[in-house]
Image (cartoon, grey):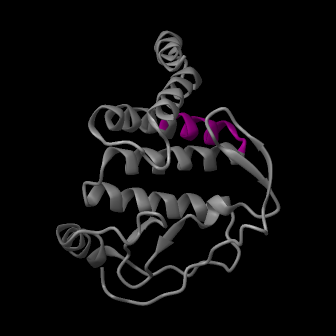
Amino acid sequence: VCNNVFKASTVKSSAYRMIKKDSDFFIRYSLINPYFYDVWVCNSCGYSAMKSDFHTLRSIEIEQVQKSISPKWKGRLYPEVYNVHVAIERYKLSLLNYITINSKSSKKAINCLKLAWMYRLLETDDAHKMELIFLKQALEGLSDAYYSEDFPIYGMDKYSIMYLIGELNRRLGNTENSLIWFSNVI
């Protein structure tokens, strides 16, 4: 957005170890969690996005960030090693940018899904409520993306998205919708 050059922290793939995978594709890691480093933030102008989307801006979107985000942005000083609280803040900044530039539903949905996962890591009652709020937003966005966007969506084919929609419905207590989506996958 502002042509500022900055360094973004990332995790070498050899540095993290998978412990297990939840039914909604959330991977639990030991030691270093690569999800904490998935959002890049320009400290100069405030533009934030998941690293897979960071370089895919159109000129109209750049103008939106310059008009709506940059004037209100105050730079942040992040620690060298991120924790779940830093990750939540960065995912929220990314979501704000996606909403501001009117990104595709899939981008907002995946951002919300990852935010829900971060709240899941906190394992408190308040965090659980926030997890459900963001899972609901992810479900709405993925449902919209399923009908209006081309596949693959974030590396997932049609059936993976159908399964994920079914699983999010199940986690949110929408049993009938969940069964419909799961049966469509089968």
Q: Quadrant of the C terminus?
A: top right
Whether 34 is drawn above or below 129: the answer is below
User: Which residue is outermost to the top?
Assistant: 176
Left or right side of 181 for 46: left
Q: Note whether 142 is above or below 100 in the view shown.
A: above
142 with respect to 78 (left or right): left
Left or right: where does residue 48 sit relative to residue 129?
left
Q: How many marks?
A: 0
Residue 171 spot, x, y in % from top left: 59, 25
Task: Write down the quadrant of residue 38 in the picture.
Answer: bottom right
Q: Quadrant of the N terminus?
A: bottom left
Q: Position of residue 81 (x, y in %)?
A: 71, 74
Residue 8 position (above or below residue 168): below
Task: Name the residue at 38% across, 89% down.
Answer: 4
* Closer to us: 133 or 174: 174
- Residue interval drawn in magenta: 123-133
Task: Give yes or no for residue 90 being in the magenta stretch.
Answer: no
Q: Is residue 127 magenta?
A: yes
Residue nearest the viewer, comparing 51 with 119: 51
Q: Residue at x 70, y 47 (%)?
A: 27
Residue 104 position within the rendered picture, expressed as x and y whole percent measured from the top left:
30, 49
Determine the residue positioned at 45% across, 39% down: 138
Which of the 4 image quadrants contains residue 103?
bottom left
Task: Where is residue 126? Give x, y as percent.
Answer: 62, 40
Residue that appears at 38% across and 45% down: 106
Main secondary-structure element of the magenta-colored stretch: helix
